[in-house]
Amino acid sequence: MIGAQKKRGGWSWWYLLFVIQFAVALWPPFYNRVEPTLIGIPFFYWFQLLWVIVSAVFTAIVYFATSD
Amino acid sequence: MPDVNWIALGIFVVLFGCVAWLGFAAARWRKGDLDQLHEWGLGGRRFGTLITWFLVGGDVYTAYTFIAVPALAFGAGAVAFFAVPYTIIIYPLLFLVFRRLWHVCHKHGYITAGDFVRGRFGNRWLALAVTVTGIVATMPYIALQLVGIQVVIGALGISGTGMGADLPLLAAFVVLAAFTYSSGLRAPASIAIVKDLLIYATALVAIIVIPIELGRIRRALTAVMPHWRWVRRWRCFCIPIRSRGF
């Protein structure tokens, strides 16, 4: 928290993780398919739900990597 | 009122009573001088991570999340899944903006968005414009919540005509406004804990009970009517919430 002043407006390469999840979420042709299904759930649905968890993990990684 | 669901109404009244009591009692929680704006509006900045987590969760996930989006999935199918990529995108954006905003506001003791704008840009008219925009932009949201309460009250089977139709809504809103006025942010923060626990219970029950019930309905319907086409729509509806295949 104290180091935040020194790094004001600073860039961290860890932010690129967010670009990955934005690209995945904003490009529906990538996941607009039925197969492979997971316990009967079409790919379209479970892939998006999976990325909710993945994006939470990414955010946690960026948080811990950029706050020191 | 012949259509009243008395069990649901009883649960609603008991929960509403508990929450209203909690809202007023919250004034004495982590007690501070409520005449000071940061005590009233920010809980004295003493909530900490866990309570803030409950508060944000209770504010972000509303009847919209639990009724409107599943209803859209039921009625229109996959298009309702816009809510999921939205979640994936919005949290990192808020993370990037709000973490900086929190640091700056914490350091300079800002309470409202107007305080921040005035301190950052040194222009009181800009601060006023931002504040007025904030209040005006909240109005449709409050209106939406009122419609939501009205739908809930209607679903309990309470109906009326003229002024009588709006009376339960009016009473609910007056109680809500009264405890918010007297307890400040401590009221929604304490209620958010109850609300989040209720949401967890609802989600758990939905995951367990709905697939079982729908399986039963589906078996019954397919026994009577093998090509019953609405079954497909039930499937669409329950895909987001079910945990196992049929």
Image (cartoon, coloured by chain):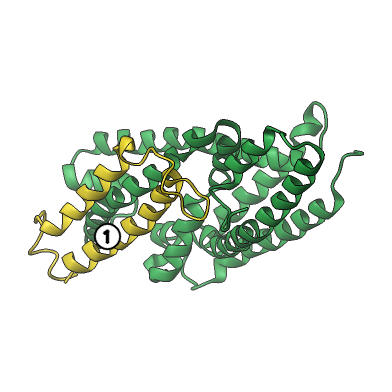
Chain colours: A yellow, B green
Residue A25 in percent (x, y) is at 32, 43
Does residue B205 appear left or right of residue B135 in this picture?
Answer: right
Q: Residue furthest top?
A: B162
Q: Residue at x 77, y 57 (%)?
A: B11
* Number of numbered discs visible in the structure rendering: 1
Dot 1: within a 10 Å radius of its alpha carbon, few (fewer than 14), some, or many (20 or more) residues? many
**Pointer 1 residue:** A58
Does residue B214 sit above or below B199 in this rendering? above
> What is the x, y in percent for residue B216?
75, 52
Up/down of B135 relative to B191, above or below: above
Percent x, y of residue B172: 69, 46
Q: Is residue B67 visible?
A: no
Q: Nearer the viewer, residue B163 or B58?
A: B58
The residue lying at 68 percent from left, 32 percent from top is B229
| A43, B3: nearer the viewer | A43
For badge 1, the amino acid type reads: Phe
- Report x, y in % for residue B139: 50, 34
Left or right: residue A4 compared with residue B75: left
Q: Residue at x 77, y 55 (%)?
A: B13
User: Tag 1, which secondary structure?
Assistant: helix
The quarter in which the N terminus of chain B is drawn is: top right
Which of the pair B201/B237 is nearer the observer? B237
Q: Quadrant of residue B25?
A: bottom right
The residue sitting at 22% across, 49% down in the picture is A20
In the picture as drawn, the residue positioned furthest to the right comes out as: B2
Chain containing the residue with disc 1: A
The answer to whether residue B42 shows anywhere in this view is yes
Residue B206 placement: quadrant: bottom right
> Does residue B64 appear left or right of residue B163 in this picture?
left
